[in-house]
Amino acid sequence: MPEPKRLFIETLGCAMNVRDSEHMIAELNQKEHYILTQDLSQADLILINTCSVREKPVAKLFSEIGVFNKKKKPSAKIGVCGCTASHLGEEIIRRAPSVDFVLGARNVSKITEVIGVKHAVEVETDYDESTYAFGEYRSSPFKAMVNISIGCDKGCTFCIVPATRGEEISIPSDLIVQEITKAVGTGAKEVMLLGQNVNNYGRRFGAHNEEINFTGLLQKVSKIEGLERIRFTSPHPLHMDDAFLEEFAANPKICKQIHVPLQSGSTPLLKAMKRGYTQENFLNRCAKIRALCPEATISTDIIVGFPGESDADFEETMKVLEQVRFEQLFSFKYSPRPLTEAAHYEAQVDPEIASARLSRLQAHHTEILDEIMGAQLGKIHAVYFDELKPHGRIAGRSDDGKLVFVEGSEALLGEIVDVRITKSSRGALDGEVI
Ligand code: 5AD
Ligand code: SF4
């Protein structure tokens, strides 16, 4: 037997990137017999799957390539993949000639083609891989991630993603069902449907065409036998019509956790961001969720310091935070990105003011979270256990997305079990199986 070739992969960014990495691992394993290693010095191939949504990770990339060069075997190749690969293309090789190839976020299926081509650069953002059947690899046997669309059609003025992942194309629903069915067959009870804008599903397909929207897809997927939980990320508030929210509330397989990315609470700022909704529309959608499904948790993304954000605009964001009481908050300081409209807006906000706003926002959210988590004591949650922890503990997620620990063994892995909450902290709950 020849020595297996070893692959080291670092993944930054969102769930989409995590899934792209799984796809590359599968392709490299099945076509080129690579096996994964956590040890960089043993690797024959090193992939960095990058994110470019904010500036920091991009800056980190070049220093990281330098570190990898020092630690790697001399013969090991380095490939830069993902969103920064799409956005910088061959500039990456100009700045770091030790990089062997560059593979964009929209070109993942070409991984086995580029590894043998010195200084290959494959970064087209109109490449259609929506019907490509990738090899099988999943980092968790219990939960499957499945792409339902690639790219994004929205023109949010702060966001680089449409420039790195291209126009939105939906994946045929039969292919999605086939992939989930395979995962269920190997033990997954939960699926996470992935896309940049999942509830826009069905607006455009590639070569294949069909009449279906996101609500239709949820109904179709929920018929898969053995599949017990469906999650999805990320939806857009603009496409949360009543039919979708009614399906969300009524379908017992759909987990009662929903991400509703606000970005800003100020209507004029939302207009400058080209989000397509007002504060009032946003609050109306959240009120509808609460009315249809009071047990649902709502999470959000907020950007502070977007160009032109005044104190009064920021107070509107605080008002929405207080009103909706988001369970989870992902908050960011605005980072001007190339290839985006807002980077050219005048009235960029002083970074110190933006930092102060971010701290205030996060501090208030922490208070809200403490109240929400404190109120969990004594409650009963159905928990899907998927991770063994040290000291005889095991962790899983409740239907509404909370991290729950109990004392338990392997016997609980892959099981959905009722748990009574006995202790709460900001990030997680402890409980006992009942
Ligand atoms: N600056 C800061 N945050 C951003 N996001 C997207 N682009 C930017 C940017 N230029 C945030 C948004 C988005 C999340 C994934 O990242 O809140 O929802
Ligand atoms: Fe980062 Fe956005 Fe690309 Fe995901 S899609 S890796 S968040 S830039």
Image (cartoon, rainbow, N blue to C red):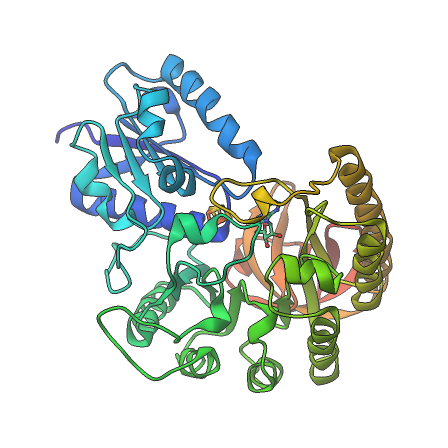
The reply, left or right, for residue 5 in relation to residue 406 is left
Q: Quadrant of residue 152?
A: bottom left
The image shows residue 229 at horizontal and vertical percentages of 52, 71
Question: In the rendered image, which quarter contains the C terminus?
Answer: bottom right
Q: Residue at x 35, y 63 (%)?
A: 186
Q: Nearer the viewer, residue 200 or 76?
A: 200
Residue 139, visible in the rendered structure? no
The image shows residue 383 at horizontal and vertical percentages of 62, 65
Q: Nearer the viewer, residue 329 or 54?
A: 54
Question: In the rendered image, which quarter contains the N terminus?
Answer: top left
Q: Quadrant of residue 408?
A: bottom right
Q: Residue at x 77, y 43 (%)?
A: 358
The image shows residue 360 at horizontal and vertical percentages of 84, 45
- What is the count of numbered marks? 0
Q: Judge whether 85 appears above or below 175 on screen.
A: above
The reply, left or right, for residue 41 in relation to residue 63 is left
The reply, left or right, for residue 65 in relation to residue 353 is left
Q: Nearer the viewer, residue 202 or 139?
A: 202
